[in-house]
Image (cartoon, grey):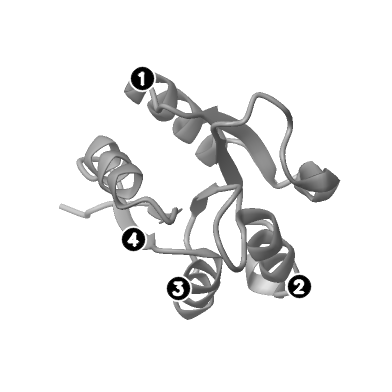
Amino acid sequence: MTSVARKRILIVDDDEGVRDALEGFLRDWYDVVTAVDGFDGWLRATEAPPDLIIANVRMPGIDGAEMVDRLRRTESLRRVPVIFMTSAPETPASGRDSSPAVRTFLPKPLDPSLVERRVRRALRAPC
């Protein structure tokens, strides 16, 4: 019997509760790695490229948009799909989020069924 490799999801958020909640929603179906900020997310993604990144837009230091800008400069990470999380009602981050690899936004507080639908869609869609 052959086993199918599980998709790897990188969750990047400075809020431990959000990281824990997302990991709890997803860990039964995916390998989940977490990062505490944009710099940590960038490091973890370059060390072991994920299949999907879920990142908070606004974080201290390197925010989600800047992290994605940096990842797009690396050939192996250029096409990794990204889902941005935001509690702000407006579209975040000064237009840098217009990358075609940014699939969608997740509003905070997180709804588990919406998270599941958006993750499945992002992993199915070609970049």
Q: What's the residue type where badge 1 is placed?
A: Ser
Q: Which residue is mark 1?
A: 113
Q: Which residue is mark 3?
A: 44
Q: What's the residue type where badge 2 is placed?
A: Arg
Query: Rounded to the nearest whole Å, what is the CA distance between mark 2 and mark 4?
Result: 21 Å
When asked about the image quadrant of residue 28, the answer is top left
Whether the residues at callouts 4 and 1 have beta carbons within 8 Å, the answer is no
Specify whether residue 10 is in view: yes
Whether the residues at callouts 4 and 3 have beta carbons within 8 Å, the answer is yes
Precedes in sequence: disc 3 or disc 1: 3
Precedes in sequence: disc 2 or disc 3: 3
Which residue is at a point 55% across and 56% down the rendered structure image?
59
Secondary structure found at label 4: strand
In this rendering, position of residue 98 left or right of residue 114: right
Query: Rounded to the nearest whole Å, what is the CA distance between mark 4 and mark 1?
Result: 20 Å
Q: What's the residue type where badge 4 is placed?
A: Val
Q: Which residue is mark 4?
A: 33
When asked about the image quadrant of residue 111, the answer is top left
Secondary structure found at label 2: loop
Q: Which residue is mark 2?
A: 73
Residue 101: image location, x then y, percent: 70, 47
Residue 47: image location, x then y, percent: 46, 80
Query: Rounded to the nearest whole Å, what is the CA distance between mark 1 and mark 2?
Result: 32 Å
Query: Rounded to the nearest whole Å, what is the CA distance between mark 2 and mark 3?
Result: 15 Å
